[in-house]
């Protein structure tokens, strides 16, 4: 889940609480055991944190993430440190399906609705993935 991304080093997460940037960066730094700096501050892991609306109002874009750490594992640990759910893209082509790292560290597949706004993407309507999205719809036979 969420670890087959062909561009290692870039993670985009949505967090289920409003949390300030210093706390988010601190949780990521503690998890990765590396320095995390604001965007544009060098060649360390960089993090851009901003607030939007929706059920996951804190967005974190993490750049230069270490390739040896899987994204889902890192998100799970950050969720525990922040005591907040962390939503990250899964590796399917389904645009509404995500991996949810719960505050207790549990990972599960979910769906959310996403709306683009002037402030960034808002995600709402969290619901469990029942597995139907993995099935290929049957096509009618050619006439």
Image (cartoon, rainbow, N blue to C red):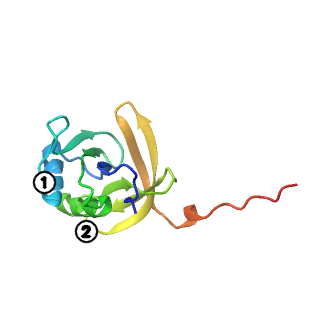
Q: Quadrant of residue 77?
A: bottom left
Residue most toward the top? 118
Residue at image mark 1: 34
Q: Where in the figure is residue 70, as x and y percent of width and height?
A: 29, 61
Q: Which mark is residue 104?
A: 2
Q: Secondary structure at mark 1?
A: loop
Q: Where in the figure is residue 114, as x and y percent of width and height?
A: 45, 45
Q: Which mark is residue 44?
A: none
Q: Quadrant of residue 1?
A: bottom left
* Structural crowding at the residue carrying mark 1, measured as other residues with C-alpha within 10 Å and reported as few (<14), some (14–19) or many (≥20): some
Dividing the image into 4 quarters, which one contains the C terminus? bottom right
Q: Where in the figure is residue 56, as x and y percent of width and height?
A: 33, 49
Towards the viewer: 119 or 67: 67
Towards the viewer: 76 or 122: 76
Q: Secondary structure at mark 2?
A: loop
- Position of 26 with respect to 129 (left or right) is left
Q: Which residue shows up at 38% across the image and 59% down it?
A: 2
* Structural crowding at the residue carrying mark 2, measured as other residues with C-alpha within 10 Å and reported as few (<14), some (14–19) or many (≥20): some
Q: Which residue shows up at 40% across the image and 34% down it?
A: 117
- Position of 133 with respect to 42 (left or right) is right
Q: CA distance from mark 1 to mark 2?
A: 23 Å
Q: Nearer the viewer, mark 1 or mark 2?
A: 1
Towards the viewer: 104 or 40: 40
Q: Where in the figure is residue 44, as x and y percent of width and height?
A: 15, 45
Towards the viewer: 44 or 21: 44
Against 136, is 122 above or below? above
């Amino acid at each position: 889940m969420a670890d087959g991304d062909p561009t290692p080093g870039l993670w985009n997460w949505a967090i289920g609480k409003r949390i300030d940037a210093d706390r988010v960066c601190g949780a990521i730094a503690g998890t990765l055991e590396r320095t995390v700096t604001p965007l544009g501050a060098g060649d360390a892991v960089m993090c851009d944190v901003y607030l939007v609306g929706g059920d996951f109002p804190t967005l974190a874009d993490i750049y230069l993430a270490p390739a040896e750490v899987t994204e889902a594992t890192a998100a799970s640990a950050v969720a525990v440190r922040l005591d907040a759910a962390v939503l990250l893209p899964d590796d399917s082509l389904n645009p509404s399906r995500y991996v949810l790292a719960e505050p207790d560290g549990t990972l599960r597949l979910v769906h959310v609705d996403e709306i683009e706004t002037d402030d960034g993407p808002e995600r709402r309507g969290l619901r469990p993935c029942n597995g139907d999205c993995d099935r290929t719809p049957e096509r009618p036979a050619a006439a």
